[in-house]
Image: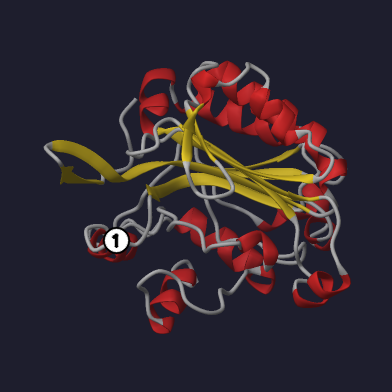
Amino acid sequence: MTARYPKIRTTVDIEGEQITVLKEGVHVAFYMPGFHQEVAPAVMQSLERYLHALGPASLGWYVDNDGYWWSLSDKDEGFLRNQLMDPRGARIEARGRPDSVTGIGFSYVGHAFVTPLFAQNYPQAMCAVEFWLPTEFLEEQGAEAAHALTIELGRGLPFSSGHAGLSFETWGWMEATTPVLRESSLRHPGFDLPRPSALEMYLGSRRVRGPSWLNFLGPPILEELGGAEGLRARLHSPSTEVQALSLERAVVSLGREPEAGDLETGDTLPHYRELASVLEPWLYEHQGSWGALTKEEVRRWERRFL
């Protein structure tokens, strides 16, 4: 396949070794109302599908509650499963490597219960799961395989929303990465920025992130749009497809493969803009700081398709 996105990578020299601190990849995320006990079994099935596709050893490291990385090769085979199925809730982050971004990753946040103060401060809090696919997966397996895998990752999840598409994977807004993130995101609207910290605490079931390659919609927003049929009637781009996953949930695919777009060449991704117009009443607006971006830059980026 001919990739419709640029390779955007940043490396730094650490004691003579070149470490990748920013890399283009495919970010997959689902946001789920309810408690950990309700969603964990479905998340476990999605993780098993992910590991089956990328290989059981693809996730090689995990981070503990104190921020230290540990090798999963030193743990029992069922370590991640046991962590995920803990009835007390779970906060998991695993990656291909601890020192360099690879495009392979899994994270999950699930709340088993909330205190009255937590509920008061974070009334929109949800459970959230994320997966990363390297662009090498697209190039070796094809966009159809990535599309099918992402659909299967979300099919059994009780999500209210979700998205999958090109994004920048990075360890953070470092001095070496901030200029790249700022300049590339303004030029290539199809790239998502590293998501705001703790987004699952604020997004809620009545808001969605801006358009991406694959856009998952569930209750209540899909119902307010008239279900899959009602949504399909609003979208007219020949490259857009609306697929019902159940009576309550659907996915909108914007093309056969993810696209970055390029404002310098006039590629504004009109099919992304069409979906943004339909979803505008429900689009999430970030509040507070976001890396090194100013409020004006955040607002401009979030409304790049409007």
Q: Quadrant of residue 183?
A: bottom left
Q: Residue at x 78, y 47 (%)?
A: 228
Q: Is residue 140 above or below residue 304?
A: above
Q: Amino acid at mark 1?
A: Met
Q: Secondary structure at mark 1?
A: loop
Q: Is residue 302 above or below residue 134?
A: below
Q: Quadrant of residue 275?
A: bottom right
Q: Position of residue 302 (x, y in %)?
A: 48, 70
Residue 257 is left or right of residue 240, and the answer is left
Residue 269 is left or right of residue 36, and the answer is left
Q: How is the image coloured?
A: secondary structure
Residue 233 is left or right of residue 145, and the answer is right
Q: Is residue 232 visible?
A: no
Q: Residue at x 63, y 69 (%)?
A: 283
Front one among 128 and 118: 118
Q: Residue at x 36, y 25 (%)?
A: 139
Q: Position of residue 126 (x, y in %)?
A: 75, 57
Q: Position of residue 248 (x, y in %)?
A: 85, 46
Q: Position of residue 23 (x, y in %)?
A: 32, 43
The furthest residue to the left: 16
The furthest residue to the bottom: 296
| Total marks placed | 1
- Which residue matches tag 1? 174
Q: Is residue 302 visible?
A: yes
Q: Quadrant of the N terminus?
A: top left
Q: Quadrant of residue 263?
A: bottom left
